[in-house]
Amino acid sequence: ETGVTQTPRHLVMGMTNKKSLKCEQHLGHNAMYWYKQSAKKPLELMFVYSLEERVENNSVPSRFSPECPNSSHLFLHLHTLQPEDSALYLCASSVTGAHKAFFGQGTRLTVV
Amino acid sequence: GQQVMQIPQYQHVQEGEDFTTYCNSSTTLSNIQWYKQRPGGHPVFLIQLVKSGEVKKQKRLTFQFGEAKKNSSLHITATQTTDVGTYFCAGPNAGNNRKLIWGLGTSLAVNP
């Protein structure tokens, strides 16, 4: 069903590690998003890229660094994370604007 | 800031019973979207409502958008175990239509 693919599906990392999450969409969309989903909290929008330009950065700590090399790919680079950063990280894409979003299956991140 | 509230937070029903979740926005919305997330899965777009007073049906699911475009509901008739999951509503941010504001979701459990 999904035209949005995320890798890896699961990731365990130490607080001193550096890792990257990858997202790829095959829907021809021109906006891509990173969301964080934690238990008992609303979906938190982290970053928005529209036409490969970052247009939104919702006060996300600098230990999260996004990259959008083209309209089909989105990365989230992680370094020196904290245990409270453990969550499900969801990538989504859409036509520009707050139109219906198509989500990837997410990366379940655990920081130890 | 703009908020989207959903009630109830949890609902437990017997298979065959009806279910309704309600979504209330602090501001008027240009549209409202509904998503379903199965346990262990990712949010999947269900529907978008745009017009004041709009009602849309998808098989056993009925979606309504209030006259003032500040509230919405999702009603499921004769629930089935396949309906289990969390139902989210989301609407565009009033000041920035690149962002969706999400409700906390209603988690539905269905006893067979």
Image (spheres, coloured by chain):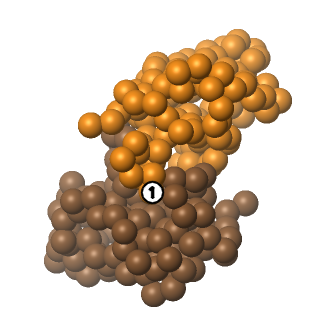
Query: Which residue occupies the foreground of this view, B46 or B14?
Result: B46
SS class, disc 1: loop
Residue B79 is situated, as x and y percent measured from the top left of the image, at 72, 21
The colour with which the image depicts chain A is brown
Asked if one can make out residue A22 in the rendered structure from this viewpoint, the answer is: no
Q: Which residue is drawn at 21% across and 54% down?
A: A84
Task: Farthest residue to the bottom: give it.
Answer: A69
- Amino acid identity at mark 1: Arg
Residue B8 is situated, as x and y percent measured from the top left of the image, at 46, 19
Q: Which residue is drawn at 26% across and 81% down?
A: A18
* Other residues around mark 1 within 10 Å, as few (<14) / some (14–19) / many (≥20): some
Residue B59 is situated, as x and y percent measured from the top left of the image, at 83, 29
Q: Is residue A43 left or right of residue A3?
A: left
Image position of B15 with respect to B30: above or below:
above
Image position of A74 with respect to A106: above or below:
below
Q: In which quarter of the image is residue B66?
A: top right
The colour with which the image depicts chain B is orange
Asked if one can make out residue B43 in the rendered structure from this viewpoint, the answer is: yes
Q: Residue at x 50, y 77 (%)?
A: A51
Marked residue chain, label 1: B
Position of the N terminus of chain B, as image quadrant, is top left
Q: Which residue is drawn at 58% across and 62% down?
A: A94
Task: Farthest residue to the right: give it.
Answer: B59
Position of the C terminus of chain B, as image quadrant, is top right
Q: In this view, does B66 lie to the left or right of A18?
A: right
Q: In which quarter of the image is residue B65?
A: top right
* Residue that label 1 marks: B98
Residue B25 is situated, as x and y percent measured from the top left of the image, at 43, 28
Image position of A48 with respect to A41: above or below:
below
